[in-house]
Image: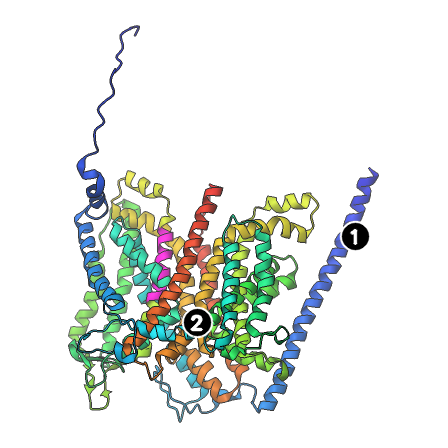
């Protein structure tokens, strides 16, 4: 085919817009909402559902809501026949919801604890923060001691003691969640290592503990901690009510944490162990310097997931008679000066908002972290 | 050469030393654990003697003396024993768990599939449901349904009247109660025969298809066998089923089927909550089936429903069943939150009332935990069998 004729286009083609029906808002609507009769039907059902739920909800929560006043202001009246949420109730009780019966003059200590905790969490959660090892030391060693001194009091340095009976509300919820976290991570690591140990007794003790705790509901663990624990120790050593619940929560969380960390340990390739052994590292140095750092990194999202579950589970201490945030809502809701169906709904809506903001925030963080991990490995 | 010889000579002794170290560690651990148990037992004995609490399981046959609001088997405060109360509580736990498992599975599969929909609005709504429900504690949801919704229903006088003679008020839901005549057993037998025949038909059709390649559509015959046959027997036997209609009195409602608000609140909350987790399990399972599988099935000319039935669902189910079972276990364990609203489940009846009356914390808590533990262990045993059964055989 020897030929020296060829065709070469001298001018570029005119760029055409995509067909109208496939581009822009219209195209998007068509592709995502109205692609087939079935889809049109689904979209219609969804729109009806939204129209049925959302406007009344907004009317209840915002438009018709009562923002200030007392119980009477929240009841149906001539100028507000369908009263909405009674935010006045939350306003009046807010300090109770946060501090419980913590003495008013001492509440700055609780505030300081919140700040110290927020600082620690921020430092740990910010993955590119400087000196995160110091942050871990701060969070797992300095903060617990500091919090104990701040919250329980230390008369020697002028902080009067505050009995845990007076603690309540968000303070207790945060304390239970934080103690669960701070205890369960190291205990969970130890249990996970023990379960993978070659030594039979160590392994079986860990397996028994983990499977036992994971096989029973948290409620029964809390019952056990609150009614059986006092029997098992000499009378004078009997721990106080909050401490008993904390022990139960810490036990429960460590078993779940152990399983999550064990999954991380399994994910580490054998070659890593073998390389460490070839370098002459013993078991503990292999674990501490080679295996654990990698295992914890890949399993960090799951650790935060355990923490989210733990945060929701703190509400169960309610049942063994501890005034956590939910219990303070229940108590305030039942106050004869306030009680009414609308107040109940408002109280629950407020509690739901609190837990949702906390848990959803954490789950968004996990999501971001997972994407980061996927990017790095992919 | 000498170096090598020395190191190989040293190795056994080092291993020997390590073995001795391990052995010592194990003995020490066992000793510590036994010591702790002994100390705890001693303290418990001292403390219980001081508080004048009995020990042992003798209380099992003592008269309970407290009422239970919902009992599936005969129970009375004055005549029944603590042991009977235990069975009543356990049955109530199993009842609410079983019904909630059915409801949450149905809701969870619908929402999980809706999340995968190509319809933007549908998937966003399903996603919103999952995020909202998952991030609010279950206990709060139970309290909400119980205190804010069901307890705010009208009182007895203003009961909502439902079709077919039911009532709804803040004391519960009252429905017509089916009353089975003795002849009804014929219908049950007919149903059993129908199911057996339908299964036999299915096996025959499968063999025939494998032999000849011809397909038989079985939907009609199956329906006729499973629904039609019992229905005909029902008509022939003279409709051996009547309904006890609840009767509204001045102070209470008599007759009919009573559904306690505690049961309803727990059921709704458990189903709604677990459905959000099941939806995620379903979504993950379906997404785990590679797109190539669907494409290959379509390339072979299978219709989209056949693709789904024969290619996607079997592979997705293998991913879905284990985490689904663990959700069922979670649901069963979470049903213990009944204690917060006073539904008489195992924990409320046994670890609550019985514990308070007898004071025998150790025995009561141990029995309660043993029940949940055996449910968990049996389920995980079944799951590992299932896992071995469906494991992909690699060639």
Front-most of residues B66 and B206: B66
Front-most of residues B210 and B44: B44
Residue drawn at the location 54% of the way across and 79% of the way down: A163
Q: Which residues are magenta?
A: B272-286
The label shown at residue B316 is none
Q: Is residue A134 above or below residue A25?
A: below
Query: Is A299 placed left or right of A23 in the picture?
Result: right
| Residue picked out by circle 1 | B13
Residue B298 shows in the view: yes
| Residue picked out by circle 2 | A98
Local packing at callout 2 (Cα closer than 10 Å; few below 14, some 14-19, many 20+) is: many
Residue A44 is one of the magenta-drawn residues: no
Residue drawn at the location 82% of the way across and 44% of the way down: B6
Q: Element type at marker 1?
A: helix
Front-most of residues A95 and B225: A95
Query: Which x, y percent locates residue B313?
Result: 33, 51
Query: Is B199 placed left or right of A320 in the picture?
Result: left
Query: Which x, y percent locates residue B67?
Result: 38, 88
Q: Is residue B179 above or below residue A55?
A: below
Toward which corner of the image does residue A236 lie, by quadrant? bottom right
Residue drawn at the location 40% of the way across and 80% of the way down: B89
* Helix, strand or loop: magenta stretch: helix
Q: Are marks 2 and 1 in contact (CB under 8 Å)?
A: no
Q: Chain of mark 2?
A: A
Residue B275 is one of the magenta-drawn residues: yes
Residue drawn at the location 25% of the way across and 46% of the way down: B304
Q: Are marks 2 and 1 on the same chain?
A: no
Query: Which x, y percent locates residue A71?
Result: 29, 79
Query: Is A242 placed left or right of B259 in the picture?
Result: right
């Amino acid at each position: 085919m020897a030929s020296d004729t060829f065709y070469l286009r001298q001018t570029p083609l005119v760029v055409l817009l995509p067909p109208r029906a496939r581009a822009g808002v219209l195209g998007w609507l068509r592709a995502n909402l109205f692609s087939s009769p079935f889809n049109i039907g689904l979209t219609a059902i969804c729109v009806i559902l939204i129209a049925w739920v959302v406007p009344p909800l907004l009317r209840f929560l915002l438009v018709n809501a009562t923002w200030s006043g007392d119980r009477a202001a929240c009841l149906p009246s001539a100028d507000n026949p369908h009263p909405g949420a009674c935010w006045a109730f939350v306003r009046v009780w807010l300090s109770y919801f946060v501090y419980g019966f913590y003495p008013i003059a001492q509440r700055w200590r609780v505030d300081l604890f919140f700040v110290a905790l927020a600082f620690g969490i921020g430092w740990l959660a910010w993955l590119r923060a400087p000196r995160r090892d110091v942050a871990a030391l701060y969070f797992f060693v300095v903060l617990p001691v500091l919090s104990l001194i701040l919250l329980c009091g230390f008369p020697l340095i002028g902080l009067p003691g505050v009995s845990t009976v007076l603690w309540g509300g968000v303070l207790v919820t945060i304390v239970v969640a934080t103690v669960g976290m701070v205890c369960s991570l190291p205990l969970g690591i130890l249990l996970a290592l023990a379960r993978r140990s070659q030594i039979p007794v160590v392994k079986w003790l860990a397996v028994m503990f983990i499977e036992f705790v994971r096989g029973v509901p948290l409620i029964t663990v809390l019952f056990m901690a609150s009614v059986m624990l006092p029997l098992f120790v000499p009378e004078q050593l009997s721990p106080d009510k909050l401490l008993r619940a904390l022990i139960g929560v810490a036990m429960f969380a460590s078993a779940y944490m152990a399983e999550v960390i064990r999954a991380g340990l399994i994910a580490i390739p054998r070659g890593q162990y073998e390389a460490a052994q070839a370098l002459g590292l013993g078991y503990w140095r292999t674990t501490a310097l080679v295996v654990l750092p990698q295992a914890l990194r890949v399993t960090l999202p799951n650790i935060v997931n355990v923490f989210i579950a733990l945060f929701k589970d703190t509400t169960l201490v309610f049942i063994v008679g501890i005034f956590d945030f939910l219990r303070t809502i229940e108590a305030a809701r039942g106050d004869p000066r306030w009680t009414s169906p609308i107040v109940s709904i408002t109280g629950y809506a407020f509690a739901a908002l609190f837990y949702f903001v906390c848990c959803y925030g954490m789950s968004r963080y996990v999501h971001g972290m997972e994407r980061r991990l996927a990017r790095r490995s992919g | 050469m000498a170096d090598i010889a020395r190191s190989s000579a040293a190795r056994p002794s080092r291993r020997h030393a390590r073995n001795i170290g391990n052995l010592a560690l194990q003995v020490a651990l066992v000793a510590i654990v036994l010591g702790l148990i002994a100390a705890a037992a001693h303290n418990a004995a001292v403390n219980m003697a001081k508080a004048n609490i009995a020990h042992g399981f003798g209380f099992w046959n003592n008269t309970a003396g407290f009422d239970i609001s919902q009992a599936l088997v005969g129970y009375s405060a004055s005549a029944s024993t603590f042991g009977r109360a235990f069975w009543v509580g356990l049955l109530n736990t199993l009842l609410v768990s079983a019904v909630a498992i059915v409801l949450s599975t149905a809701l969870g599969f619908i929402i999980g599939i809706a999340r995968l929909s190509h319809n933007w609005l549908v998937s966003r709504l399903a996603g919103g449901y999952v995020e909202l429900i998952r991030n609010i504690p279950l206990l709060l949801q139970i309290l909400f349904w119980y205190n804010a919704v069901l307890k705010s229903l009208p009182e007895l006088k203003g009961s909502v009247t439902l079709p077919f003679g039911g009532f709804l008020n803040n004391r519960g839901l009252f429905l017509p109660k089916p009353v089975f005549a003795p002849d009804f057993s014929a219908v049950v037998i007919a149903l059993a025969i129908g199911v057996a025949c339908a299964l036999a038909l299915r096996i025959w059709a499968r063999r025939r298809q494998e032999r000849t390649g011809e397909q038989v559509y079985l939907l009609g015959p199956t329906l006729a066998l499973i629904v039609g046959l019992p229905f005909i027997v029902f008509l022939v036997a003279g409709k051996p089923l009547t309904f006890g209609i609840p009767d509204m009195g001045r102070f209470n409602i008599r007759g009919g089927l009573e559904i306690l608000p505690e049961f309803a609140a727990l059921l709704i909350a458990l189903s709604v909550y677990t459905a959000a987790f099941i939806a995620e399990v379903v979504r993950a399972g379906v997404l785990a089936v590679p797109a190539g599988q669907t494409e290959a099935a379509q390339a072979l000319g299978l219709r989209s429903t056949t693709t789904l039935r024969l290619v996607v669902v079997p592979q997705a189910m293998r991913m879905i069943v284990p985490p689904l079972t663990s959700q069922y276990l979670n649901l069963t364990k979470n049903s213990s939150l009944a204690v917060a609203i006073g539904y008489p489940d195992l924990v409320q009846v046994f670890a609550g009332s019985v514990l308070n009356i007898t004071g025998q914390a150790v025995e009561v808590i141990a029995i309660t935990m043993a029940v949940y533990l055996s449910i968990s262990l049996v389920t995980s045993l079944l799951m590992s069998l299932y896992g071995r059964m469906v494991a992909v055989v690699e060639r």
